[in-house]
Image (spheres, coloured by chain):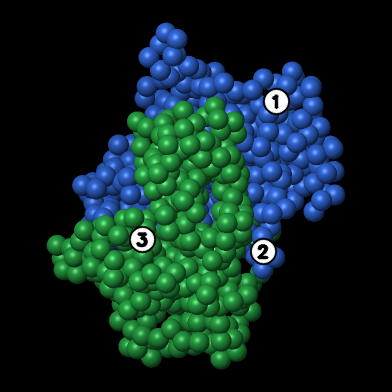
């Protein structure tokens, strides 16, 4: 398991990404100094709660930030292409062809007045200069690939005629249509039932293997991360607070936030006594505590935490693991219940 | 006069609810949301209801608290059938069954202070007289949900999601109900605050002897909260029983599929790869399959399933609605 992608297979390289929103009450830093790599064929999860900045970061990478957002980065590369150097029009061309996004709410992401065949076919006609008939055939192939039954019959149907799970499959079909190097999936299964969620996760997992795509999965769900992610980046209050391989991070967390989260989730496979509850609630991006942003909720808090924000540093026992905590070595040696 | 543990506080029998959709004529459709569901709750007990969207679990909850009238069936609270009484009596009886809603952002009136929000049911039901008594009772209720009484003059937007859900719980507790119906009470909350609310509900149930009906799509939360668990599929109960039995030895094919599809945080990862595949999506409740409503997606399906509706029958520590429950249970213990 590689901690960061080497340059040949690297699909996405991000260094020092920051996103600030201009609001009536001043500027709000939503994402601060995020570094991230995704290799081809790799599935990286960006885990965080509401307000952690995970979606703002994803949108900034796609070039889809809101008009009041200011995005800055030292490096923002898709393969060998420097995204910062491109014009808006060039980036627009890139979206769909080389990088694509899957949204949470499939019903509002699809055009309700166009048939599925027209929406999928449009991609091929715009970007691949296929004829109407060829585009239709390609669209049918795609629908079959994402597991839609009887695709030739359903191609003329409209979005409302599909179930939630099927609509999410159609969104994924649109995202993979032009074989992009990178897919960013923002909470793709949050609105779905568990049996359908399992199907969609499996689909994403097999597609990135078969098509050698890089997948960045934005999620708040530790269970989802545990099932499919190769690597995990945990975000809290706009920053990455912990990163590493999913196996190591989930079994031996080094940040008190990750560790507390892992202890607070109930499990379906056995029953425990009281759940471990984390006190307080996540800070709003506009109003962050001084020092380490997690310190008011942290069980490991010491004086230093209230004044000095710990930088994201490599752990001494594993150079592929990062954590931003003054006491990460101690946290790592506490056995996680589970 | 709190009921002693084990007393039957809520007894719903054979509830049916059908909704009509469309404008009439050819497009008119009947959606069978709840089809012959019975549930009992004893004082101090928690019953979890799990199922996917469209299975009727929210409709069931709304009928139990009186927000929806069942087409047929009875709901007995405190020994009286609340579906038969009208007007004032009905309202008084309803005070015994209160609801905690899913979304603490939309279920609290933004223009009311916490004092007004929690005090409203007290005033409506004449439980307190005078502003001072109301304030004292609201302070007491806030204490129950671990919020400082000083916060009662604030408005909902000044609270976080977890705190708002506590306010919703305090409001539901104001009339000292015997049953608290919670419809997805934590699914709208951030993951780091879900445990606070789950623990609070569990404490209230155990300390105050309130019966808890806990509806959720998250199987892990239900396992944690519920003494007994009911699994619903397309408006019917598939399996009901002691929570450990239902989770550890599921005897309905749907329970098995649901459990195996639920993501688990575990070192033993990628369990989904070995899960039981369910073909397709749940059928529409407007056109439910004949016989056993699950037969179209069931891996144990035989011709009998499409013809005969299996009734709930006892099997060990649970009841199950499947013709082949014995074989299904065997298959589960063989693979796990």
Q: Foreground mark, 2 or 1?
A: 2
Question: Which of the two marks, 1 or 3, is nearer to us in this view?
Answer: 3
Q: Colour of chain A?
A: green
User: Of all residues shown, which one is farthest toward the left?
Assistant: A24
Mark 1 lies on residue: B292
Location of mark 2 (residue): B269
Left or right for A177, reference B127: right
A64 or B189: nearer the viewer: A64
Residue A249: x and y in percent read: 57, 74
- Label 3: few (<14), some or many (≥20) within 10 Å? many
Mark 2 falls within which chain? B
**Residues behind callouts 2 and 1 on a single chain:** yes
Which residue was labeled with disc 3? A62
Q: What is chain B's hue in the picture?
A: blue
Residue A79 image position (x, y, % from top left)? 44, 69
Mark-to-mark CA distance, 1 and 3? 47 Å
Q: Do the residues at discs 3 and 2 belong to one chain?
A: no
Secondary structure state at the residue bearing disc 2: loop
Q: Is residue A267 above or below residue A167?
A: below
């Amino acid at each position: 398991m590689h901690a960061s992608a080497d340059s040949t297979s690297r699909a996405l390289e991000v260094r020092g990404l920051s996103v600030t929103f201009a609001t009536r009450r001043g500027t709000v830093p939503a994402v601060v100094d995020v570094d991230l790599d995704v290799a081809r064929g790799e599935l990286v999860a960006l885990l965080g709660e509401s307000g952690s900045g995970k979606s703002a970061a994803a949108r900034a990478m796609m070039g889809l930030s809101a008009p009041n957002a200011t995005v800055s980065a030292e490096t923002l590369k898709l393969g060998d292409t420097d995204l910062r150097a491109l014009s808006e029009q060039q980036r627009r061309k890139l979206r769909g062809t080389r990088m694509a996004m899957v949204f949470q709410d499939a019903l509002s992401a699809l055009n309700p007045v166009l048939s599925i065949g027209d929406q999928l076919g449009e991609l091929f006609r715009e970007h691949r200069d296929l004829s109407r008939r060829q585009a239709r055939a390609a669209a049918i192939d795609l629908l079959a690939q994402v597991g839609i039954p009887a695709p030739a019959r359903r191609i003329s149907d409209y979005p409302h005629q599909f179930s939630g799970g099927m609509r999410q499959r159609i969104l994924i079909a649109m995202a993979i249509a032009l074989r992009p190097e990178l897919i960013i999936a923002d909470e793709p299964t949050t609105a779905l039932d568990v049996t359908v969620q399992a199907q969609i996760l499996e689909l994403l997992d097999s597609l990135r293997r078969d098509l050698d795509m890089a997948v960045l999965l934005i999620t708040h769900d530790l269970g989802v991360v545990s099932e499919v992610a190769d690597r995990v980046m945990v975000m809290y209050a706009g920053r990455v607070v912990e990163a590493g391989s999913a196996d190591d991070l989930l079994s031996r967390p080094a940040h008190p936030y990750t560790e507390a989260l892992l202890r607070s989730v109930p499990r379906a496979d056995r029953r425990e006594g009281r759940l471990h509850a984390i006190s307080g609630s996540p800070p709003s991006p506009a109003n962050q505590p001084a020092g380490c942003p997690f310190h008011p909720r942290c069980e490991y808090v010491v004086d230093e935490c209230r004044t000095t924000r710990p930088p994201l540093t490599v752990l001494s026992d594993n150079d592929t693991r990062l954590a931003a905590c003054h006491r990460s070595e101690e946290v790592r040696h506490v056995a996680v219940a589970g | 006069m709190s009921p002693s543990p084990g007393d039957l506080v809520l007894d719903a029998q054979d509830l049916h609810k059908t909704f009509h959709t469309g404008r009439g004529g050819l497009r008119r459709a009947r959606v069978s949301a709840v089809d012959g569901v019975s549930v009992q709750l004893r004082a101090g007990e928690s019953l979890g209801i799990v199922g996917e969207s469209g299975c009727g679990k929210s409709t069931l909850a709304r009928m139990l608290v009186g927000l929806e009238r069942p087409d047929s069936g009875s709901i007995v609270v405190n020994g009286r059938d609340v579906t038969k009484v009208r007007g004032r009596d009905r309202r008084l009886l309803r005070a015994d069954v209160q609801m905690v809603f899913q979304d603490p952002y939309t279920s609290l009136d933004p223009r009311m202070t916490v004092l007004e929000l929690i005090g409203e049911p007290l005033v409506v039901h004449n439980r307190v007289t005078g502003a001072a008594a109301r304030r004292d009772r609201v302070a007491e209720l806030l204490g129950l949900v671990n919020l400082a009484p000083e916060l009662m003059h604030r408005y909902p937007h000044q609270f976080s999601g977890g705190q708002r859900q506590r306010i919703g719980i305090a409001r539901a507790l104001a009339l000292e109900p015997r049953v608290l119906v919670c419809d997805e009470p934590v699914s709208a909350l951030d993951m780091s605050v879900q445990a606070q609310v789950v623990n609070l509900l569990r404490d209230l149930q155990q300390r105050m002897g309130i019966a808890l009906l806990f509806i959720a799509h998250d199987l892990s939360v239900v396992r944690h909260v519920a003494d007994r668990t009911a699994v619903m599929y397309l408006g019917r109960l598939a399996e009901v029983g002691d929570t450990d039995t239902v989770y550890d030895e599921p005897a309905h094919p749907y329970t098995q599929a649901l459990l195996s599809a639920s993501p688990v945080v575990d070192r033993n990862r990628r369990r989904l790869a070995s899960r039981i595949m369910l073909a397709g999506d749940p059928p529409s409740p407007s056109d439910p399959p004949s016989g056993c409503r699950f037969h179209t997606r069931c891996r144990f399906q035989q011709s009998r399933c499409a013809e005969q509706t299996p009734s709930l029958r006892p099997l060990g520590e649970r009841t199950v609605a499947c013709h082949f429950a014995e074989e299904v249970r065997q298959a589960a213990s063989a693979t796990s």
